[in-house]
C-alpha cells in the first residue's frame, strides 16, 4: 500500500510521528503549525511547475508561472503548439523551454504514475529531459501526495535542517538523507516542516 498525504489528518499523523521520535521536532512543531498540504493536481502542469522552479527563487518562479498561465501555456497541447520564442517571451530560459517542449512531446502516462512505487515513479520521471531527482521528488510529493518522498537536494530543506538542529554547517544531500532516516515513513511531512521552519527563520518561502 502506498502511503499518501491527502488531508490535514494525514499531516497530523505524520507530525505526531515526528514529535514522538524526536524532541527537536516535538519542540519545533507547535511553532510551525499548521503545516500546509501543498497538494496540486497531478499531470503536466504540476511537472511544468517543478521545471519552472529549478534553481531560481520562489518569487521568480511565481512570476514566470503567471506569465505562462496568462499566455495559456500550461498544457501539453499548448506547449506542443508553441514556438521556442513563445516560451522565451514568457520568461523561460532556453534550456527550460526545451525541456517543457520535450516533456510535452513525450506522451507520458501521468495517470499511470500514481500506481507506481516511489522508486519506479521517480525512475520514469527522471527519464524525461530536464527532470532530475529533485524535480521528480517534488512532483511525487506535491502532485502524487507521496508521504515518504523527501528531496534531500533542496537547498531550503538543507538550510531548514541546519537551523532546526543547530548544525555547524548546512548538510549536503547525503548527510540530510541520513538525518532523515528516522523520519520514515513520513519524510514528506518532515519536508513540509523544514520548509515551514525555514520560512519562520528567514521570513521567506523556500518552496512554492
Image (cartoon, helix red, strand yellow):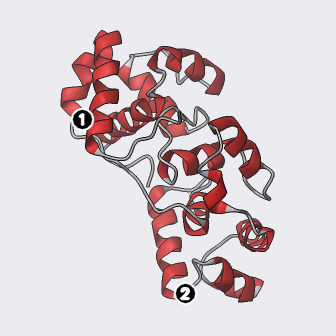
Rendered location of residue 184, percent (x, y): 48, 21
Give the structural element (helix, strand or loop) at label 1: helix
- Give the residue at mark 1: 32
Q: Name the residue under label 2.
A: 72
4 over 76 or under it: above or below: above
Name the quadrant containing residue 47: bottom right
Using the image, determine if residue 55 lies above or below residue 16: below
Mark 2 touches mark 1? (CB < 8 Å): no
For label 2, the SS is loop
Foreground residue among 155 and 99: 99
User: Along the line of sight, which residue is nearer the eye, 140 or 70?
Assistant: 140
Which residue is painted at 65% across and 44% down in the image?
116
In the rendering, at what x and y percent does residue 26 appear?
25, 17
Q: On the image, which quarter does residue 97 sit in?
A: bottom right
Residue 166 is tagged as none
Q: Report the side of 194 relative to 15 (left or right).
A: right
Residue 163 position, x and y percent, is: 39, 25
- Residue at 51% in and 54% down: 143
For mark 2, does the 10 Å Cα neighbourhood hold few (<14), some (14 to 19), or many (20 or more) residues?
few
Depicted 203 relative to depicted 15: above or below: below
Residue 7 visible at all: yes
Amino acid at each position: 500500500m502506498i502511503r499518501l498525504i491527502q488531508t490535514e489528518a494525514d499531516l497530523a499523523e505524520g507530525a505526531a510521528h515526528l514529535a514522538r521520535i524526536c524532541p527537536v521536532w516535538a519542540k519545533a512543531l507547535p511553532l510551525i503549525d499548521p503545516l500546509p498540504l501543498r497538494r496540486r493536481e497531478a499531470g503536466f502542469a504540476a511537472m511544468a511547475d517543478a521545471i519552472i522552479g529549478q534553481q531560481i527563487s520562489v518569487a521568480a518562479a511565481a512570476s514566470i508561472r503567471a506569465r505562462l498561465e496568462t499566455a495559456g501555456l500550461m498544457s501539453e497541447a499548448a506547449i506542443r503548439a508553441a514556438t521556442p520564442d513563445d516560451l522565451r517571451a514568457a520568461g523561460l530560459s532556453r534550456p527550460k523551454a526545451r525541456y517543457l517542449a520535450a516533456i510535452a512531446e513525450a506522451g507520458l502516462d501521468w495517470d499511470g504514475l500514481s500506481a507506481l512505487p516511489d522508486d519506479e515513479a521517480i525512475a520514469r520521471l527522471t527519464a524525461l529531459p530536464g527532470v532530475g531527482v529533485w524535480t521528480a521528488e517534488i512532483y511525487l510529493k506535491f502532485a502524487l501526495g507521496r508521504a515518504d518522498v523527501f528531496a534531500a537536494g533542496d537547498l531550503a530543506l538543507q538550510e531548514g535542517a541546519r537551523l532546526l538542529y543547530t548544525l555547524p554547517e548546512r548538510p549536503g544531500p547525503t548527510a540530510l538523507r541520513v538525518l532523515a532516516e528516522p523520519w520514515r515513513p513520513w519524510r514528506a511531512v518532515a519536508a513540509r516542516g523544514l520548509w515551514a521552519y525555514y520560512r519562520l527563520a528567514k521570513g521567506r518561502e523556500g518552496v512554492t
